[in-house]
Amino acid sequence: MADKVLNKVPMPEQDPKVRSGNFQEVTLGYSKAMAMEEAERCLNCKTKPCVNGCPVGVRIPEFIGKIKEGDFTSAYDIIKTTNRLPAVCGRVCPQENQCEDKCVRGIKGEPVAIGRLERFVADYIMENNASTVAKPKSNGKKVAVVGAGPSGLTCAGNLAQLGYKVTIFEAFHVAGGVLMYGIPEFRLPKAIVQKEINSLLELGVEIMTNMVIGKVLSLDDIIDMGYEAIFIGSGAGLPNFMGIEGESLIGVFSANEYLTRINLMKGYLEEYDTPVIKSKNVAVVGGGNVAMDAARSAIRMGAEHVYIVYRRSQDELPARKEEVYHAKEEGIEFMFLTNPVKINGDENGRAESMECIKMQLSEPDESGRKKSVPIKNSDFIIPVDTVIMSVGTSPNPLIRKTTTGIEVNNRGCLVVDEDMMTTRKGIYAGGDAVTGAATVILAMGAGRAAAASIDKYISKK
């Protein structure tokens, strides 16, 4: 019987030797038969622990129940009551640490493949044009959203569903935020993101691009335009560097810049005249999902050797296990317990090697992970012509520097109360602008919570 099957239905995917040479999606998705087979593994627990593990509260057993019946449209409608971007979440959410981590089936065997099923439903609806979006009746109120990333899109969609006239002000020339500029095509096709955004446009959400708030308009200007509340979902796009010698050399990038050139500027396509260095030996410094994205993009751009340089051991890697597994399959070389100390350049100012030192682990630091400390006289050099720094990001200070009355913490993140309002009345914030760099689904959860608070705030005015 299906409820006694211990393992998930395997996800079809491209062969590693083939996919490492293209930017097509790695995982190919379930067929209808696969999805219905996997759905049968769900026990429909009365306590629904999986729902408690979801930052946006997707009604998981209910939508899986509809998949069992072959009613994929109803499954989609159930998901959309709480999740504005199901095709995105089904691909990039860390389900293994959230909903699937709470799944009872995981006690003896593998949990139900909740993310794969969510992706299947969303893709099925998109492919078959099986969903119609009814534009809600207007309540006559206007709300502005700064940033068209996961938190901003979610907040805008939820407010539009309640009848608000929502305008999103986006700094880039396209909406999507990190979904467009950060996550590579082989993990999240941009056509999928655009379809999710189009569903918001059908709700009546207006998106104004090339609007750098703090330059083109200030928050005060937006308030003067008649918006009754503002949600700031501007993310954390300011890259951090290590502060070591050689970071200004040609061939040294932040992961944000490198991925933006490839993803948003289509640097992986020959027909686009995007400046991207054709590297031979690449070192990516860091161990998160962004580092994996950069390394896997570099191998697809033709690099012969790509190294992940990480100062802790594999056990401390913050990246998703699936991404690490795929990276290794594609030939990425991992250098654990290693830390850069200097980048060397040639006579033309181009990176040509990186000096590193071996590390060892000691007692845990403030994050709960073991500290990494250098081992004396363990220095060595690796030849590289490209170094990609993926050591974290911070919120851009532009908005807070051009707006009075908004407080930030010592990390430059906006301070909000339990209702997600900043220290200035009527201005809310969420996502990476508040937490620092985190996951897509956590940003979406913040956007959803902020929308509810904004609705409550305006209703009381």
Image: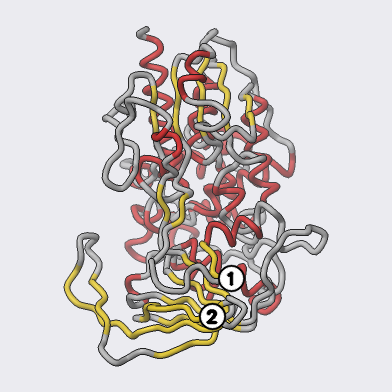
- The x, y position of residue 271, in whole percent, is 82, 59
Neighbour tally class for label 2: few under 14, some 14-19, many 20 plus, Cα within 10 Å: many
- The x, y position of residue 419, in whole percent, is 31, 27
Q: Are marks 1 and 2 in contact (CB under 8 Å)?
A: yes
- The x, y position of residue 206, in whole percent, is 63, 25
Name the residue located 42 percent from the left edge and 78 percent from the top edge. 342
At mark 2, the secondary structure is strand
- In the image, which disc is placed on residue 250? 1
Image side of residue 54 versus residue 141, left or right: left
Looking at marks 1 and 2 on the same chain, the residue that comes earlier in the sequence is marked by 1
Q: Quadrant of residue 407?
A: top left
At mark 1, the secondary structure is loop
Q: Nearer the viewer, residue 280 or 90?
A: 280
Which residue is most to the front?
347
Image side of residue 197 versus residue 223, left or right: right
Q: Quadrant of the C terminus?
A: top left
Image side of residue 371 versus residue 132, left or right: left
Q: Is residue 282 above or below residue 148?
A: below
Name the residue located 44 percent from the left edge and 55 percent from the top edge. 94
Q: Nearer the viewer, residue 291 or 439?
A: 291
**Residue identifier under label 2:** 345
